[in-house]
Amino acid sequence: MSRRRIGFWYRFAAVLCKPPLVVLIKRDWRGMEHIPADGGFITAVNHNSHVDPFAYAHYQYNTGRVPRFLAKSGLFKKGFVGAAMRGTGQIPVYRESTDALSAFRAAIDAVERGECVAFYPEGTLTRDPDGWPMTAKTGAARVALQTKCPVIPVAQWGCNELLPPYAKKPHLFPRKTHRVLAGPPVDLSRFYDQEMTADLLKEATEVIMAAITRQLEEIRGEKAPERPYDPRRERIEQRRRTHAQTGRGAARTGDGAPQAGTEERADEEVPVTGPGAAQAAVDVSRSGTEEESGK
């Protein structure tokens, strides 16, 4: 299938966005030869700055295969922003859907039409303290296994130095370099034609994220942690530490005593009981509710 024309709206967005990007950041872009010339495919990209969707879109725009990002469906209803989202072919994600595949139906349709769909599998800015990719949602794997399309792992670094995650003020000087490295397609063939269980999707997602992490290791010249940062696990551990400290404080003041065996149970999945249990359950539930979205 031939590539889709870039179109007026994407060219208009490029006219607006490219000049400031050229001024603000230098470029070290590699791996463009791995971006397919034709047919539908997915790019799976790490996310460490609110600026990097624009910088990455610039990278891929220069390959001639513009990315179609996923975004919350509500953004497509808001005036000029909505018109631009629709005009540039961005893809709405219907988070209210109870069917996981239906939530990504538009992405599946786009790939089957020969489009490129850009996923940020982490679903949000990485929370890893050193900027490495963290555990990811399964949306990219769902679409990839449904369509059997190529999945191109892409790592980027540098926009986080311009605007660190969750920072409000950019660090303009010295001028930063946006480094991008796209790799060869991830081999997911062993997952094809199997029941799309939670375990299967989790394993396929881990394969995709491992490929992105290897690309980022090459860019940074460093070794990533053996285990990706997991926000859900971190919330559980933080709740566990807080609960343990509360128990020790109560024991010292004579207001109560920690339950026997607390230390021995420290490695269990969610050993939280008592007054903090309800809040812990809320925190854990919230940590798993974010869906894939583009920026």
Image: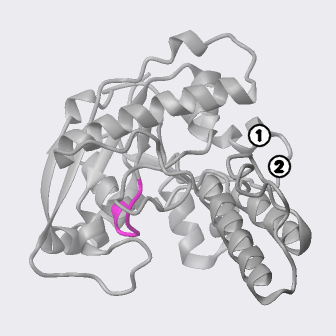
Viewer-side residue, 130 vs 43: 130
Q: Tell me where residue 257 sits by quadrant.
A: bottom right
Q: Is residue 6 left or right of residue 279?
A: left
Q: Is residue 206 above or below residue 283?
A: above
Q: Which residues are magenta?
A: 47-52
Query: For residue 66: magenta?
Result: no
- From the top left corner, tell me how far across and down residue 191 is, in percent: 60, 15
Q: Which residue is painted at 41% across and 23% down in the image?
A: 186
- From the top left corner, tell me how far across and down residue 5 is, in percent: 38, 42
Q: CA separation, marks 1 and 2? A: 7 Å
Viewer-side residue, 295 vs 289: 289
| Circles 1 and 2 in contact, beta carbons < 8 Å | yes
Label the magenta part by its dominant secondary structure.
loop
Viewer-side residue, 246 vs 160: 246
Q: Is residue 16 above or below residue 259?
A: below
Q: Is residue 100 above or below residue 290?
A: above
Q: Which mark is residue 244?
A: none
Quick one: SS at disc 1?
A: helix
Q: Amino acid at mark 1?
A: Ala
Q: Which residue is painted at 83% across and 86% down in the image?
A: 254
Q: Which mark is residue 100?
A: 1
Image label count: 2
Q: Is residue 270 above or below residue 20?
A: above
Viewer-side residue, 273 vs 137: 273
Q: Which residue is painted at 78% across and 89% down in the image?
A: 253
Q: Amino acid at mark 2?
A: Ser
How many neighbours does mark 2 have within 10 angstroms: few (below 14), some (14-19), or many (20 or more)? few
Q: Which mark is residue 97?
A: 2
Quick one: SS at disc 2?
A: loop
Q: Is residue 19 left or right of residue 136?
A: left
Q: Which residue is painted at 70% across and 38% down in the image?
A: 105
Query: Can the viewer see residue 3 in this picture?
Result: yes
